[in-house]
Image (cartoon, coloured by chain):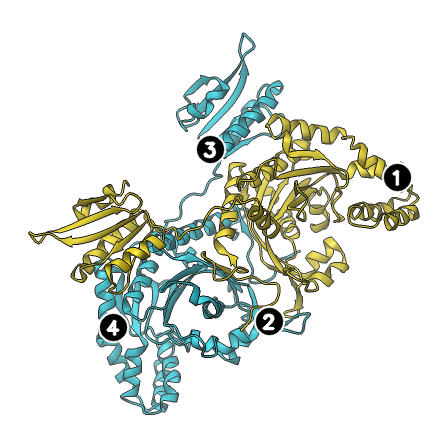
Chain colours: A cyan, B yellow
Amino acid sequence: MERLPGFRDFYPEPLPHAEAWSADARNHIFRAWRETARRYGFREYDGPPLEPLELFTLKSGEEIVGQLFNFVDKGERAVALRPEMTPTLARMIATSERAYKKPIKWFALPQLFRYEKQQKGRLREHFQLNCDIFGEADTAADAELIALLIDSLRALGLTHEDFVIRLSSRNAWQEFFAARCQDETKAYDFYQVVDKIEREKPEVTAQKLTALGIALDDVKHFIAAGEPTAELRTVIDNLAARGLGAFVKIDYNVIRGLAYYTGVVFEAFDKKGEFRAIAGGGRYNNLVKLISAGKVDLPALGFGMGDVVLLELLKSRGVLPKFTSGVDVVALVEDETLRPETLGLVQQLREAGLAVDYSLVPMKGDKQFKRALELAATHTVRLERGADGAVLAKVKNIQTREEKVVSPTDVIAALGR
Amino acid sequence: MERLPGFRDFYPEPLPHAEAWSADARNHIFRAWRETARRYGFREYDGPPLEPLELFTLKSGEEIVGQLFNFVDKGERAVALRPEMTPTLARMIATSERAYKKPIKWFALPQLFRYEKQQKGRLREHFQLNCDIFGEADTAADAELIALLIDSLRALGLTHEDFVIRLSSRNAWQEFFAARCQDETKAYDFYQVVDKIEREKPEVTAQKLTALGIALDDVKHFIAAGEPTAELRTVIDNLAARGLGAFVKIDYNVIRGLAYYTGVVFEAFDKKGEFRAIAGGGRYNNLVKLISAGKVDLPALGFGMGDVVLLELLKSRGVLPKFTSGVDVVALVEDETLRPETLGLVQQLREAGLAVDYSLVPMKGDKQFKRALELAATHTVRLERGADGAVLAKVKNIQTREEKVVSPTDVIAALGR
C-alpha cells in the first residue's frame, strides 16, 4: 500500500534508496534549529495541527481554502490541517500574553500542510522553524530576529558565501505607492505585482502597474537605487555591530506576498540563486488584533524556514555530516554461558549513558565484530572466563585495535568515561 | 477564536493558567524517550500523519472508522489522520526492509488522532513513543524491548516503586482456549472477554464465557495461578540478568485488545493503580505480511507509550523538574553608548554556545537585573568604560553576587567556559 502523494516517509540512514528522505538529516536540522533558538533565549511552543478553518480564512481570505487540506469533521465543524503556524500562535498569544513578560520570544517546529495541485516533486507537507517576537515595536527586535535566522543557517555549516538575507520594507514601498497613487485600497494589489516582479514577464508587470497609474521604470529605478530607509539603516547597523553585516543586503525586490506584513520584511536566499527562498518573514503588527477581534494589540514579527529547500541547499554545499548508527559500544558474546553477565554489563553501560548494541541471539564472533564495524562503534567489549574461572572483560578500541583486559566492573573507566 | 475540542496548545513555562499544557514538560518527556532509545541503539523514523484510510481498516477492520478523523480529500481519496503508527511502520518496513540488517530496531514519536465522542478531559490527539523490532523471532528481542520500556520510564525519574510491567502471553491464552474450545474462529472473541475482565461485571463476563463453553472460575484460576510459560520464563530470566527483575510480574489479566498480537504481550501500570495503562505492546508476527499482501514476512514486536497518562503520573509522583528559561547569561546595557559593543559581546557568547538574553531597548539597570533573576540566569555581564576610556566587562555570578572585571575578550573564560 502506497503513502499519499506529496507526503514523506523518513528513514534512518543508510537510506534504502536514493529518493528516500532521511530521518537523520531531518533531526540534524531540527537539532540545529532548536539549539540556535535556545542560544537566543527563544522558548518552544506548539499548537494543534488541525484548526478551525475560519482561523485561516480570517487571516488570509477565502481564497486560501483552495490550497488547504480542509474538511468537515464528524461534529460538523469546518476544519483544516494548518498551512502555517502564525494564526495558531496569534491565537495563543491573544489568549495568554498577559501571563508573559514582554518581549515574548517563542519558536516552534510545526509540520504544515497544503493541498496544491500535484506537480513533479511538489510536496503537500513540510516542516518549518517558526520564530516570533511579540511586544516590541523597536527595530532592535527586527535585528534580533534576523540575527537568529542567520545563526540558524550558520549552525548548519553555511557561511556568508552560501546565503544572504535580502532586506526590504513594506513601509518603504508604502511611501513609494502613496506618493504615486491616492487610492490606498489598491496598495495590496501593488505589493502583489512587486512580489512577482522577478518571476513575471516585464510586459505583464508593466501592464498591471499602468493600471495602477505607476510606471515600470519608476519601480525598477526605486529597486535599483536600494536606498535604505532610516528603519532599515538601524537594522543593518545593529547586525553589523554583531559582526553579521556580510549576511544582509538591501533588496527592494522582496516585499512578501502575504497581506499582513507591516514593516521590515526579508527573505533568505542561496547566493548562487539555484533555489527558491530558504526563509522569509517580517513585521506583522496588526495580526494579533485581528485574530483577537480587537481585544489584544501587540506589535509582532516573525519568520518561517522550511526543511525542504534547506536540505537541498545543505546537500548541494556538501555540509551535511555523515550519519552513523550512533552506537558507541558493541558487546560481543563469544561464550554463550556468559550471556547473562553480558546482559548485566550492557545494562551497566547503557545506564552510564553509552549507546550499546549486541547480538540478540548466538552469532559467530567474526560476524559480531563485522557488525560492530558496520555500526561505526568506537569500541567492542566481551567477557571471557579466565584460567581461574574469574570473568574478565576485554575492551577493544576499534580504530587502534588496542585491547585492554579489565575487571567487568572497570569497563566504563576503560572506555574513558 | 477557540481551538478545536480535544486538541492542545503547548505553552512555555511558567504556564499562563493551571489547565495549560506545558511545552517544556512535553519536551522533557521527548528528550528522555529519544535519549533512552539512543542508548539501546534504536534509530528514529517518521511517516505521514495523514494516510490512506485503507491502511487502518486493513489492519483493524471497518469498525475502526467510527473512531477515526477520516475524510475524503480533494483528489477523492479516502484518508485519515493516523490513529496509531504501526500500520505506517509496517508499510515502510515492507517496502524497504531488504536495505537494513536485521534485527531492525526503530522508534518514532508520532502525534496520533482519534475522533472519539467527546468526554470530560478526553483528548482527540496525543503523542506516543513507538519502539519496534523486526526480524528477530527469539524472545531475547521481547526482553530487549521490555528493558527499553523500563529504562524509558526510569529516565524520567520513576522507580520500581512507581510502576510495574505486567507480562502475559497470547500463546498461553491460546493454549488455554484450544484445550477448552475447538472452534478456533472464536479465539478472538474469547481474548476480547479476557481483555475486559478487570472492568466488566463478573456476571456479564461469566455469561459471555459460558457462550464459548468456558467457566469463569476456570479463567480466574488460570489468572490467579499465573504460571509462566517457557517463553515468559526466558523473558523474565533475561530481564533479571540485567538487574531489572523487580520491574516485571506475570499477570494474565493482560491480553491486549487488538487482534494482531501473537506472542508475549505486556502493559506498564503505575503501582498504586491510580491511572490507566502507561504503555502497552507485544509480538505481532503476522502484520508485515498482512500489510505487504504476503510479499514480506518478518517477525515483529513493539510497544507504544502515550504522553498524557505518563505526564499525570510524573506530576503525581513529583519527579518533574522545575522548568526555567534556559538562559545562561543576561547582558546588561547600562551605558547605551556601549550597546553596539554589547551586541558584539552577546554574539560572541552565543557563538560559544551560551544562551544569552538582553533588553532590546533602553531599560533601567535594576529592572534589567530583576529580569535576569526572573530568567534564572547564572550570570550577568555588562560593559563599562574605564577611566582611561578602555572598555571593561563586569561578569557577575548571580548566586554568589561575586563580580569579576575582565577584558571584553576574556568574558567566556570568566564565565568558566
Q: Is residue A389 left or right of residue A221?
A: right
Across and down, in percent, residue A231 comes to 25, 73
Q: Which mark is residue A328?
A: 3
Tags 1 and 2 both on a single chain? no
User: Cα distance, mark 3 to mark 1?
Assistant: 52 Å
Residue ID for mark 4: A231
Q: Is residue B131 left or right of residue A149?
A: right
Quadrant housing residue A236: bottom left
Residue ID for mark 1: B217
Point out the tag, 4 or 3, that comes first from the N-terminus: 4
Q: Which mark is residue B353?
A: none
User: Cα distance, mark 1 to mark 4?
Assistant: 82 Å
Residue ID for mark 2: A79
Tags 1 and 4 both on a single chain? no
Residue at image x 41%, y 29%? Answer: A417
Point out the image quarter for the N terminus of chain A. bottom right
User: Cα distance, mark 4 to mark 2?
Assistant: 39 Å
The chain that hosts pointer 4 is: A
Tell which tag, 1 or 2, sits nearer the viewer.
1
Instruction: Give the amino acid at mark 4.
Output: Glu
Tell which tag, 3 or 1, sits nearer the viewer.
1
